[in-house]
Amino acid sequence: MHKIAVMPGDGTGPEVVAEGLKVLKAVSEKAGFDYETAEFDFGGDRYLRTNVVLPDSAVEELRQFDAIFLGAIGHADVKPGILEKGILLRLRFELDQYINLRPVKLYPNVDTPLKDKSPEEIDFVVVRENTEGLYTGTGGFFKKGTPDEIAIQESVNTRKGVERCLRYAFDYTRRRDREKTLTLCGKTNVLTFAFDLWERTFHEVGESDYPDIKRDYAHVDAICMWMVKNPEWFDVIVTDNMFGDIITDLGAMIQGGMGIAAGGNINPEGVSMFEPIGGSAPKYTGQNVINPMAAIGACQLMLETLGELEGARMMEAAIVATLKKLKGMGAGQMGHSTSEVGDLVAESVASS
C-alpha cells in the first residue's frame, strides 16, 4: 500500500492534480497495486487565511508518506517568493530531497521549437543537485540601502552532497541502459573551487565504481548550445543546483513546453515530491483549459520511483497513445478541455 500526500496547491494546480489522480486510479486498477491519498491545503489561500505558510507540524506529517503529489505553488495575491521559499524550498531541504530529476522527452505530436528534431532525438534526463549550491541562502547584505551596499550569495558544495548526487546519476544512467553516458555540466574554467570538487569526485567515483558508464564533461554554456543544436548527443546530464535550474527550463521548452514537462524532488531513502513544472497560471483558474499532461507525467515518474515499474510503463504508454490522437499538445489541446484530456488518458489505460 503506497501512502501518497496530495497538495493541489494554487491556481490551476487542483485541476491538473485531479486529472493525474484520475489516471493513477485507472492504472492502479489495471496494474493491481493499492494506494491511499491524504490531501493537504498548503498554498496561497491557506496563507492568506491564517498568515502561516507551512505549519510546524507539516514536515513531520509528510515524512509519514511514501510520496507527495504537488499541483502548483504561486498565488496572485501573495508576494512572489513567500510561498516558494516557505513551502517548496523548505520541503526540499527538510525532507532532504537532494535530487531533482527532470526527464526531457519529446512525445509524438508535440511541437518542439527545434527544427527537424524528432522524438528519437530528444530523449535525455537531467539530474540536478537539489539542496546545496547557491540555494542554501548563505551570504547577506552589508550597508544595505546605501550607495556602498554589498550583497554576497555563496555557493555551498560539500563532498557528501556532491558525491551522493553523482552516485544517483551514475546509478540512474546504468538503469536507463541507453547510451550509458553521463555528462557532467559545470564551469571549471571560471568556478574553479566548486567545480574542481565536482569534477574530481565525478572521475573518482566513476573510475572506482562505474567503469561501465562513459564519462563526459561540458561547460554549462556549451550544454545550452548543444541542447538546442544536437539534443541527441545527451543521455544523462548531472549538474549543480543553479545550472540545473537553468538548463532544465531550456529542456522543458525543447520537449514542448511547461504543459508537458514533469519533475521529481527525490530522496532515495525517504519521501519524494513530484510535480508538473508549469506554474499555477492563476488567470486560467476554473476555466478547464490547462494541459494536464505534465501532472499525469509527474504521476508516471512517481510510480517509477515507488517501484511500480509496470504501472509507470502503462501510464507512459497511455500518454503516448493519447498524444498520437491529438496535435500540438505543447501549446494547446486542440479543443479538448483539461478534464477531457484526463479522460482520454484514463480510457487508454483501461483499454490497454
Image (cartoon, rainbow, N blue to C red):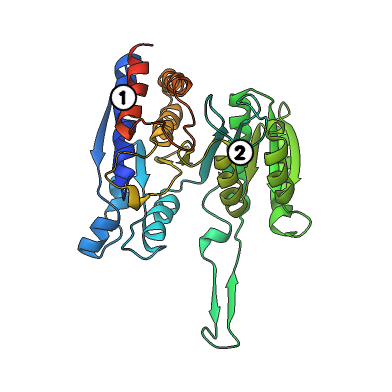
Q: Secondary structure at mark 1?
A: helix
Q: Splitting the image into 4 quarters, where does residue 251 fall?
A: top right
Q: Splitting the image into 4 quarters, where does residue 86 fall?
A: bottom left
Indicate whether 66 appears above or below 85.
Answer: above
The circle on residue 265 is none
Residue 251, can we see it?
yes
Q: Earlier in the sequence, mark 2 or mark 1?
A: 2
Q: Position of residue 151 (x, y in %)?
A: 58, 76
The 10 Å Cα crowd at callout 2, few under 14, some 14 to 19, many 20 or more, is few
Front residue of 262 and 135: 262
Q: Position of residue 166 (x, y in %)?
A: 63, 41
Which image quarter is the C terminus in? top left
The amino acid marked with disc number 2 is: Pro
Circles 2, 1 touching at the beta carbon (< 8 Å): no
Residue carrying label 2: 113
The circle on residue 343 is 1
Front residue of 300 and 163: 300
Please state if 47 lies on the left or on the right of 146 as rendered: left
The residue shown at (61%, 36%) is: 169
The amino acid marked with disc number 1 is: Asp
Task: In the displayed orientation, state which residue is furthest to the top.
Answer: 352
Indicate whether 207 appears above or below 345.
Answer: below
Indicate whether 140 appears above or below 89.
Answer: below
